[in-house]
Image: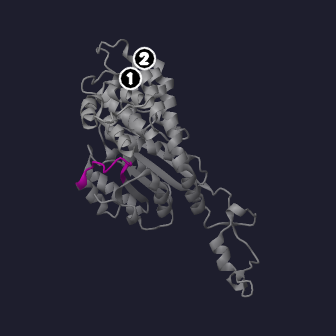
Amino acid sequence: MKDIEKLKRWRLILGKESELSFANMNEDSPIALSAEETAMDKALEEIYSSKRFGDVGNANSGTGASMPKASQWMGDIRSLFDKDIVKIIQQDAIERCGLKDLLLEPEIMDEMEPNIELASTILTIRSHVPDKSKESVRRFIAKLVEQINKMLESDIKRVITAAMNKQEHSPIPSASAIDFKYTINKNLKNYNKELKTIIPDRVFFFDRVSTSDSKKWTVILDVDRSGSMGESVIYCSVLSSILASISSIKTKVIVFNDEVVDLTEQCSDPVDLLYGFELGGGTDINKSVKYCQSLVENPSKTMMFIVTDLYEGGNAGQLLTRLRDLKDDGVTVVCLLAITDSGKPSYDVDLAQKISNLNIPCFACSPQKLPILLDCILHHRDLSILEKSH
């Protein structure tokens, strides 16, 4: 039975065109697909069969109205396959079968399983979204944002809150605010040998009162919105929204191509932030860094993340000078070549090396490591554990 199941899987992978070969291999026990497997086979055939290549999204395929057909097909694959497989099939359908032209139909968008690659594709054609599809596109982006938010929010807020409250103590008791390390150190003299434990005569708590603006950290996100940076832009939008919800820090969000746009006022809602701009255009990192310099009020309490692949279309020499000046002033500067899980990014290796020579960390980062990155910076820890080879 195990061999038959393996053969069935290979039969589904290789498609209907392999049916005769499998029959010849196993004449005594022909492979009989179940009703569900037959439905899977039919759904996969729509995009992977060489004879029917492009049938799902090709309006000239002779199969009738293609948009309802594609919408039904999207619903079928969602009911037949796991989410991770659905995302792969969707992306293949867009690339192989001309579904990009139908992507902005409301019926199609409502059936699509959210994934970051598809969202990046949508952001590159945002200006072409028809009015009838704007709400369905927004719903799609909102579902993706919710997924990313669930992955990052609790860890990021915990890291920031712990770091911001580290120096101040409060007389107001709260179990969640106990500073265990400080309390233990202050009560070592109260160790009870008989009970083998410390009996504290005083417990110290972090002060949860918001700090004044002069004591707040400022986080500047300077994000490249050229076409190659789609995934990073999406993660940065969610990150900026999480940071903006934390009262103990000030968050600035700057996006750039060959122009610089300050989106700080929109960062409270990552969906609005993403929906507010389109990927593409040139790249002038120097111009954006110049603008970000004007936002620095307290250098020693400012961290600046430049998220870019470093393919500079502006003045690279001036860029390096500005970065060195920011570093010398006391600003914590980090260059993130990408925020992605989809493999090693493409970037300007020469410029990355020159930035690294300024003792400015320059590496790609997976979204899951963003909380660790913030924790390292706030506690002045070495970032080398996060750096990837470039």
Tell me where residue 389 sits by quadrant: bottom left
Residue 205 point in image, percent of width and height:
70, 67
| Secondary structure, magenta segment, majority class | loop
Task: Specify whether residue 278 is in view.
Answer: no
Q: Mark on residue 128?
A: 1
Corner quadrant of residue 155: bottom right
Q: Nearer the viewer, residue 290 or 352?
A: 352
Q: Residues within 10 Å of mark 2 (few under 14, many from 20)?
A: some
Question: Can see residue 42?
Answer: yes
Q: Sequence-wise, which precedes: disc 2 or disc 1?
A: 2
Quadrant of the drawing holding the N terminus:
top left
x and y, in percent, of residue 339 in the image: 39, 49
Question: In the rendered view, would you say 1 is above or below 140?
Answer: below
Residue 107 spot, x, y in % from top left: 47, 21
- Which residues make up the magenta segment? 336-349
Kind of residue indicated by mark 2: Pro
Q: Which residue is mark 2?
A: 68
> In the image, what residue occupies the spot 35% across and 37% down?
8
Image: 210 above or below 277: below
Of residues 231 and 302, the one nearer the viewer is: 231
- Which residue is located at x 47 percent, y 62 percent? 377
Q: CA distance from mark 2 to mark 1?
A: 21 Å
- Residue 384 lies left or right of residue 170; in this view the side is left
Q: Position of residue 11 (x, y in %)?
A: 32, 35
